[in-house]
Amino acid sequence: MTQLPVLIKRVLCSNLPLPFDHPLTIPTLIVITSLSTLAYFYMKAIHAAYLMETTRRHNINKRRQLERPEDRFASLKVGKRFVNPFEEWQDVAFLTTALFWLRRWKGNGLPKTQEELEQTLPVHIPALDTIFTGHGNGSTDEHDHKAAPTDSLGSKGILSSSSSSTVTSPAKNPITFTWFGQSTCLITIDGLAILTDPVFSRCSINDYLGPKRLRPIPCPLDDFEKDLDIVLVSHDHFDHLDEKVVYQLGNSVTWYIPLGLRNWFLKRNVSNVVEMDWWQEIQHSSRPDITIACVPAMHWSGSRTPFEKNGTLWGSYVVKGREDSVFFCGDTGYSPELFKAIGNMYAPFTLAAIPIGSFKPEPMMQHVHMGPGDAIKVHMDLKKPRLSVGIHWGTFMMSDEHYLEPPQTLARLWKQQQDQQTHWITDLGIDSTLSLPSPPKESKDIHDPHSSTDYAAQSFTSPSTSSTTTSSNDTGGKAASTDHRSQFVTTAFGETVVID
């Protein structure tokens, strides 16, 4: 009786084509089943992507006959996912992205010594006293900010961040711009303080995960959080939306966010959010003289959780004040028709923040990020903002270019562009001093932070201009006359630029 089960097992196994009594049979079946399951879901995903791309192309073809750019480039959703309504867009396969990260050499030409890195990527203390002067619709600033020492980085031959134009007209607050790294910018316009794509973590994902920040944050958020009014969020990628900042600021500011992100904020007990679609304009609740407009961008969203992609929208923003307009460009590839449409609708711009980094390898990145060449095209499409500043570079190394390539290439291409324009004017026999008219407003001064800076192979040097700067070190603090030629520059981390 004790041998009957063994006999039955042998009989049953002998009638089957697979040797189940072999020790490798079960593991082999598990591997085959797993691979078959993965192949099934992969083919299913490929088929779904094909159908989505076919639907996207069909919608683009239908929109070609539409005249208004707001209709032709309206946000587009296929099923539960947003897609790009641009001809230039091309999806990058997951396998291609995975192979890129697996084989990527993460050197990026970074110096071996911290001293050299500090010289090529200096960090300034933001001039908070200048930034928040007249904060709150022209009122006198009551907060006691700690001013940056005027000679804090003088040993490196760099104009200190606290050097800024003297405010000459009490009736109008100047526009200020301070870059904190990546796409995090502190902008003031008409006394309203705006923070963009806030990321204050040590790494791109959080303080412990993701590519490490090359240089420290210019100053902690605690130093100025009480003065903030608005936060603009272009999309939900980790290097553009820091969850810790969301918890810290909470409902003390108004968050302007793309469609679909509201629930993410509500889960974190933040309800002071304004969800916006492309081309939508909203007057800020406490300042009806300030209009926030969300405009299209060519990018994508998701990746905060596995298998999450394009469930929320992405975009850029235009902030229209009483006399000036500011353009904040979120992550985007270059689409000529799109940016010309934005320029036609919202120009002239006093200030534009345009990404110039994370653009290599170009075949993979050109649809989601712009390099310096495309950024200059955007500057032109926007009808030459008075000052454009390159952002989204030198912070987290997540692409293949040299860490100083974006500002160096921008300076070189911008100089070439200016030289070509000068030659064209000279060939026509036109006086170059008359070819570039002043903006149709009262005279202003641009504080060019690099007009006299020469270091790191000209990595931060702005294009040559005849702008005259007025700093807090100037005797008497006089405002000088300015040539109103359009400029495209890069700044150091924390360096405050004032447009008065």
Image (cartoon, rainbow, N blue to C red):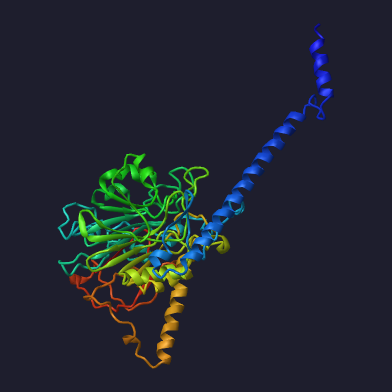
Q: Residue 496 occupies which quadrant of the picture? A: bottom left
- On the picture, is 349 further left or further right than 99? left
Compared to 498, does 282 lie above or below?
A: above
Can residue 457 be seen here?
A: no
- Residue drawn at the location 73% of the way across and 33% of the way down: 29
Taking the view exactly as shown, the residue that stands out farthest to the top is 1
- Residue drawn at the location 46% of the way across and 52% of the way down: 301
- Residue drawn at the location 21% of the way across and 68% of the way down: 166
Look at the image and tell me in which quarter the C terminus lies: bottom left
Can residue 344 be seen here?
A: yes
Q: Position of residue 252 (x, y in %)?
A: 26, 46
Taking the view exactly as shown, the residue that stands out farthest to the bottom is 429
Q: Position of residue 426 (x, y in %)?
A: 41, 90
Q: Position of residue 378 (x, y in %)?
A: 42, 70
Number of numbered discs: 0
- On the picture, is 368 further left or further right than 162? right
Q: Residue 191 occupies which quadrant of the picture? A: bottom left
Q: Position of residue 278 (x, y in %)?
A: 38, 59
Compared to 1, does 174 lie above or below?
A: below
Look at the image and tell me in which quarter the N terminus lies: top right
Compared to 298, does 476 lie above or below?
A: below
Which of these two is toward me, 403 or 195? 195
Which of these two is toward me, 229 or 294? 294
Which of these two is toward me, 63 or 179? 63
